[in-house]
Amino acid sequence: MLSYLPYCTHVKLIEETVVSSQELIGRKPLQVLEKIRENLERLNEKMEIMIELQKHGKKDIQQSLTDAPLDVMTLLSMPDHLRKTAMAACRLGRATADEIAEQTHRARAVESAYLNQLVIMGHLKKERKGRKAYFFVERESPR
Amino acid sequence: MRRLGKIIAVHSYKGGTGKTLLSVNLAATFAKHGKKVCLFDLDFRAPSLATLLKVGKADHWLNDYLNGTCEIDKVLVDLSDRVHNKGKLLVGFANPATEAIRGMSAKDRKWEMRALGRLLALKNSILNDKSFDYIIFDTSPGLQYSSINAIVSADLVLVATTFDKSDVDGTRRMLRELYDLFEKKTEIVLNKIPEASSKTRKDEVQAKIRDVYKVPLLGLIPCFCDILRAEGDIIFAEERPDHPLTKIVDQMANEIDHM
């Protein structure tokens, strides 16, 4: 669940990143670098959420997070850059930012930002499995 | 390596432009060429394939698949014996009962979103798993939910249109405000063209289409009185192999095959 205390969350996450990076010293350099990259990615996601919160305000986002089906009329009314990402997500069903980027021929970082924006808007769901983040359209009602 | 099959949506701005005529004859032509084809009636507001293909009652309708109450295998009716070749022609019918039509027009956005997911899933279940070459969606005209779902799921959209002024205007708008937004590969099929047999007239029409729509013209169907006389009861590709319409559709099928 998202936290709506963005600045505190942000600082806490940076502290966690530093602590967990310190814990890793002594391990293999590659593992350390991977852990740092993973933490930076999470940090980036949090920052995107903060930007959206600043842009739209907390209430709008809380409302959209609960119910925003990704139907064709919604796709039609989206800005072009988000529609491209959303269409690729629809086609693939469940995909990582890398897989979406392969379809849209745009950079992975760009797709990651758009996908997180679609999650914030309530059109996509996100699930982490290990180091990978999967984005998907929740079509069936949750049981 | 086998080429992955294609989903083709046959759509139009207005009704009566020949979508069903084109869908059925294209499906039959592909099957005659030895291809494996699935034809679906996605015109839930005015289903017509069941009548046209003389299938009185189906155990399961396409409505049931989209409602999530059955799998696609239960919906498909094998009509391969209607085409005399080694190809396969399976058809999924829309339920023509008034209650079913009413039910389909009252679906909400969440249902439409799930329906889109189920149409997209056909790519895996039919084209990948069953190695079919083509899925053809015969859609309802205009900006209906079911039609836009079909367009989003399709690899190629064939737009059936006439030279009727309101149809030209609407089609032009649809090309810009619908197909372009979804970045769909689109081809025009111009139907009911008077005096379209001469070469000069054909060239003139082709130039006009390029100028008005700015998309490729896949085929040009002249105004045939015997199509009207057939009262929607004849599959020309099968029953009239020498008819000019059969030859035109044959040419379109070959072009699509090479895309």
Image (tube, coloured by chain):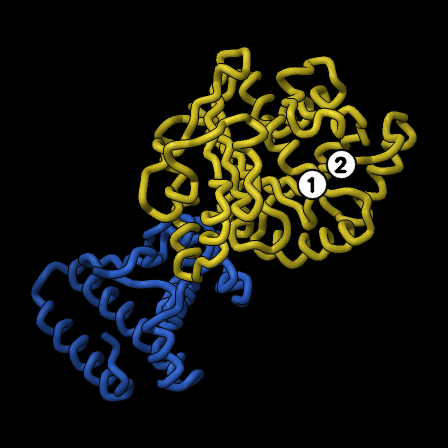
Near-viewer residue (B57 or B161): B57
Residue B190, x across and y down, in percent? 75, 38
Label 2 neighbourhood size at 10 Å, few (<14), some (14-19), many (20+)? many
Residue position for label 1? B160
Q: Quadrant of residue A41?
A: bottom left
Label 1: element kind: strand
Residue A109 appears anywhere in the view:
no
**Disc marking residue B10:** none
In the image, is A117 to the left or to the right of B45? Answer: left
Q: Circles 2 and 1: CB distance less than 8 Å?
A: yes
Q: Colour of chain A?
A: blue
Q: Quadrant of residue A46?
A: bottom left
The residue lying at 29 percent from left, 63 percent from top is: A126
How far apart are labels 2 and 1 at the CA level?
7 Å
Residue A66, x across and y down, in percent? 32, 73
Number of marks in the image? 2
Q: Amino acid at mark 1?
A: Ala
Q: Indicate whether B81 appears above or below B18.
A: above
- Chain letter for yellow? B
Subunit of label 1: B
Subunit of label 2: B
**Disc marking residue B191:** 2
